[in-house]
Structures are given as C-alpha cells and as structure tokens.
Image: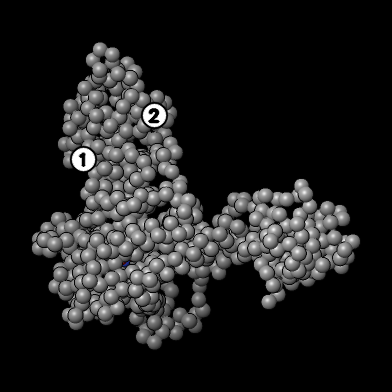
Amino acid sequence: MLKNISCGTLRSSDVGKSVTLAGWVHRRRDHGNLIFIDLRDREGLVQVVFNPEMHAKAHEIAQQLRNEWVIQVSGEVAPRPDGTVNTEMKSGEIEVYASELIVLNPALTPPFYVNEDSAVDENVRLKYRYVDLRRESMRDALITRHKVVKYIRDFLDERNFLEIETPILIKSTPEGARDHIVPSRLYPGKFYALPQSPQQLKQLLMVAGFERYFQIARCFRDEDSRADRQPEFTQLDLEMSFVTQEDVLLLTEDLFTGLLESLFSDKAFVKPFPRLTYEQSMKDYGTDKPDLRFGMKMADLGETAKKTEFNVFHNVLKNGGIVKGFSVPGCGEFTRGQIDELTDFVKERGATGLIAIGINGLDDNSGLIDMDKMRSNIARFLTPENVNEFSVSTGATEGDLILIIAGESKSTNSALAALRHELGSRLGLADPEMMHFAFITDFPLFEWDTESGCWNASHHAFCMPRDGYEDYILKDPAKVIAQSYDLICNGLEMASGSIRIHDRKLQEDVFAVLGYTRDEIGERFAQLLDAFEYGAPPHGGIAPGIDRLIMVLTGKDSIRDVIAFPKTQSQLDPLFDAPSVVEESQLKELHLEVVGIEPDDS
Ligand code: ASP
C-alpha cells in the first residue's frame, strides 16, 4: 500500500517509528521556517512538520500544499516539544517529522470547509457529497452506522437467524404508500414495483421453512416529502416462525438493550421496556409515539368543562368533541405573549385555540385556588371549584400551568401531543442521553379514512387479529384489535411489526374490508394466499428503521445526515442530478411516451 500505517491511529507509543502515511491535507500552517500540516485519513489527524534544514526538498514541495490535496508523507514519529502538546487532538502528544513528500493529487478549493463544522446549504452539501462526507461528524455517523449494523448481524446470527436477500424488482407489496414502478422492456405495458418492504417475501420465506430470517433491507415508498422520510430507506427486516407476540417483543428488547450496552454505554434506558396499549397511549399522551422521558400526562376534562360557563366547551362537547389538557410544571406565571405564541403553535396543528390556566397560589381560608393570583385567558368563565377540578385531574399544583384544547378528537389529540413534545424539549425535560424505549401494542387492525370514505390498515394488511376478534372483521371492522406493535423511543416510531395472518380465508376477509374486489385480491396477492394453503406456519416479525435509529444514536436532526447519498427533502439528488430525462430511444424501447408536460429547458 501507499501507506504502512493510518495517520489517525498514531499515538505516543509509536514514537521512534518510521512511517509512511497517505491522506488529505486538513490544514496547513506556514510558520516561515517550519510548515505544519494536519494530515487526515479515515481514522483521524496527525500533525506533520516540514523542516527546511533537515529535509529541504520535502519542505519545498510542502510550500505548494493546499487544503484537501492528497499526499504521501514518510518520516519519523516524535514527541511534541514541551508546551506544544494539543489535548484536543487524539494524536496531540506526537508529530511526524517529514523526510519525503509526494503529491498524489492536487485538489480544487473545496466548496466549503472540511475542517470545520460550519453550516452549509444542504443542496451544496449533497452536490459535493464526497467532500461533505469527509467532515468529521459525517464520517463518524457512517462509522457508527456500520458498527450498529454489524452488531445487529452478529446478534441475529448468534440466535440462529439467516440473512436472505429478496428482490428489488417485484410486484407491489403495499405498506400504505405509493409504489415506485419500473417499466419492463421485455413485456411492454407491464411494470415491476419496488417493494415498500419485503413483507410478503419474508412471509413466503416462513412458509418455505426458514423459521428465522433477517435482512438489512432497502424499502421504497413514494410518499410526499417529510423531514425524516426518504423515498428509499433501510430497515432491519426480520421474521420468525412458531412465535407469539411476546417472543418477538423480548427478542427486540434484547437486541436494542444489547446494542446500547455494547456500543453506547453513555446512553441510559429503562428495562424492561414499558408497554402501553394503543388505547392507553392515545388517552394519556394523545399519540401512539409519546416521548416518555417526561411526564405531563393528559387528562380528559370533559366533565369539569361542562360545569364551566365557557360556551366553547359546551358546543364542542355537544358535537361529540373532547376537552383535554395537561399540566406544565413551574410555568404558572406565563405572559400573554407566551400563550399567544403557543396558541399559534397549536393552531398550525389543527386546533382552534388554547386555554391556559396558571395556578399561582391557594386561598388561605378555603384551601381552594386563589382566584386573584390565577391567570387565565378564560378567567371570567371559571369558578374556584372549576379550576380546582382541572388541577386535580391534570395533577397541577401551585406554580403550574394547565393547558387545555377543546375540539374534534383526532385534531385535538394531535395538537396536544405536539404541544407536549414541544414544551418537553423547550423546558429541557427530555434528557438527551436517555433512550426511553417502549412498546405500544394492540393497535386497531383498521382505521376509517374520512377523506376517501374507506377502511385503511393501521399497520398493513397482513396483521393477525387478536384471538376472539376474527368474527368482527366483516361485521364491525372498527372493533378489531390486531396482534401488532410498535417500538417507540423519545417520541419517534423505531419499529413496527405484528403476528401475521397465515390463513387464506382470514386474509381474504381483511383484503375485502380494505376494499379489494375478489378479482383484485386474486391478481395482486395470489402468491401469498396460495402459499398459505401449502403448509404455512404461524409467524410474526418486526422491522426497525435503521436510518432513524442511527439518527437518534448520533444525535442528528435529519436522517439525511446518516445516509451516505440521500435525496433532498424534495426528493432530488443534486449529485447525480436525478431524476433526469432519458433518451427518446430508451422510452421507445419501453413503449413509453411522456405526455402532458412542457420540455424541461432548465
Ligand atoms: N413490513 C412492516 C413495515 O415495513 C414491518 C413488519 O410488519 O414487519 O412497516
């Protein structure tokens, strides 16, 4: 090799060694006589010194060096002189006296600094991703990603799982998003779909008798852009035969706690992972992915709301809505401006308003709320008894703030949940070193989509109903609870899974509720339904998202920062300039014609 040791690994134990290094010029300092280079390779940095009195030739070449040039240096490792040790640098106790320097390749001035973590426009970062990935935090994220995936592979291998690849060119395997489709040249007018997940394939592997499968699988979903979504992303996809829900949950818990203990010992977690049913989670937190690092549980305040003079409450309750709220510790002395700002926050999330009640003292005589000290934007509609009941229900005590939203159930819950998360982080209640995992179980199998007026699967179409609920599938879909579960952490969904249906009739019924005709069922799902008749074992599994997991573990804000070559939030690839137009001849071969759009002359 062009180097015999990695410059980033050099330490004081290497003093006296003759080394040949190769890497990038990270920084250059010309001190008149001496030239100092921080040389960088994947493992890190080392300082290289060029001294004209000792090695004139190398020093002369070093004068031309610029940041990001690729060089090869030979020399000797020496301790740094007293007073020049750099404690910020892992190799800061030593330096290399260069005797020879070869420029392997000069470089243009990079479009942004590699040697500092300054903010750079994301489009520019992605266009020059090969430069961006040289930056320390990006390099570290990808190294962490490798280690996590390796841990997962080893963990599952030890537990008898087989890693099996499944095809990318396939037929639709739906997870509730749009498919990416690929036209077939050999079969004009026909298309492959990229898998939204290997769901049906892993089930077929169970029918095939593999019993324990996993794959670090790429999934493709054509969804509208969201901050932490990518059109393609990576899951640890796993499936097991002859298991119950409990087996899958315990394996998942062991995998995640083992991972933290082995690779992230600075992270805290709670084991066993708390478990909440979907119903409980919605009731207490208004969401199925609550951040459990802090309290602020919600309470239904409908009964008390009825007793107030506030008409908005009465109207909402009359129309089948809810009044719900929670208490925020230590924020009783809020200002009008603060509440206006929070009101805007919840309005952007579908609420019509926000009610605030600050409890700032008790009346010495009655022991009830001191109404003179109380602050509220609906103060004149409230009696001390009302406020007392609100505080008992939400657990608010002196100095706390009760926040209440009234409205239609779904939007009220989601606005309250967003508000709770926001306040948790603003008030510093969410410990960044804590990974508060929990399982949410017992999701409904179906959810009614008011917009399209049909039933959707809450998870996907393949989840097994809980025992005793099978009969409701056709009769009363809303009632059916599935053997499905999510793993959540710090307010994010980290994994989703279920015990699967392995019976043809049951699966056909579920498809029927989801609106597929018998013909469509046969056309789209024959592969799975037929397989169920050739000896399908009971099976189930789960699929943790790798990108999001690494994002949380590395403290990044975006999954794009833990994917080597992601798309922008608008699904563009500025590096390859994709998507792009293709040759007319390619379209012809595929029997395709692009119609209805102006030619792109940008
Ligand atoms: N296929 C599911 C998903 O991608 C996960 C699972 O049920 O295992 O969400």
Which colour assignment does the render follow? one colour
**Of callouts 2 and 1, which one flags the residue occurring earlier in the amino acid sequence?**
1
Quadrant location of the N terminus in the rendered image: bottom right
The residue depicted at 70 percent of the width and 69 percent of the height is 22
Q: Quadrant of ligand 1?
A: bottom left
Asked whether 354 or 469 is in front, the reply is 469
Q: Which residue is mark 1?
A: 321
Q: Secondary structure at mark 1?
A: loop
Residue density around tag 2, few if under 14, some if 14–19, many if 20 or more, within 10 Å: some
Q: Secondary structure at mark 2?
A: loop
Numbered tag placed on residue 45 in the rendering:
none
Q: Position of residue 565 (x, y in %)?
A: 52, 65
Can residue 238 be seen here? The reply is yes
The residue depicted at 79 percent of the width and 52 percent of the height is 81
Asked whether 197 or 291 is in front, the reply is 291
Q: Position of residue 384 (x, y in %)?
A: 24, 20
Q: Position of residue 186 (x, y in %)?
A: 39, 87
Can residue 48 be seen here? The reply is no
Question: Amino acid type of disc 2?
Answer: Cys
Q: Is residue 569 above or below residue 597?
A: above
Quadrant location of the C terminus in the rendered image: bottom right
Q: Quadrant of residue 53 in the image?
A: bottom right
Q: Position of residue 558 (x, y in %)?
A: 48, 55
Asked whether 227 or 71 is in front, the reply is 71
Q: Is residue 414 above or below residue 314?
A: below
Numbered tag placed on residue 331 in the rendering:
2
Report, in whole angstroms, how far the alpha carbon at label 2 lies from the one at label 1: 27 Å
**Residue 438 shown left or right of residue 505 in the figure:** right
Question: Amino acid type of disc 1?
Answer: Gly
**Residue 127 shown left or right of residue 52 in the figure:** left
The residue depicted at 75 percent of the width and 57 percent of the height is 79
Q: Residue placed farthest to the bottom in the image?
A: 186
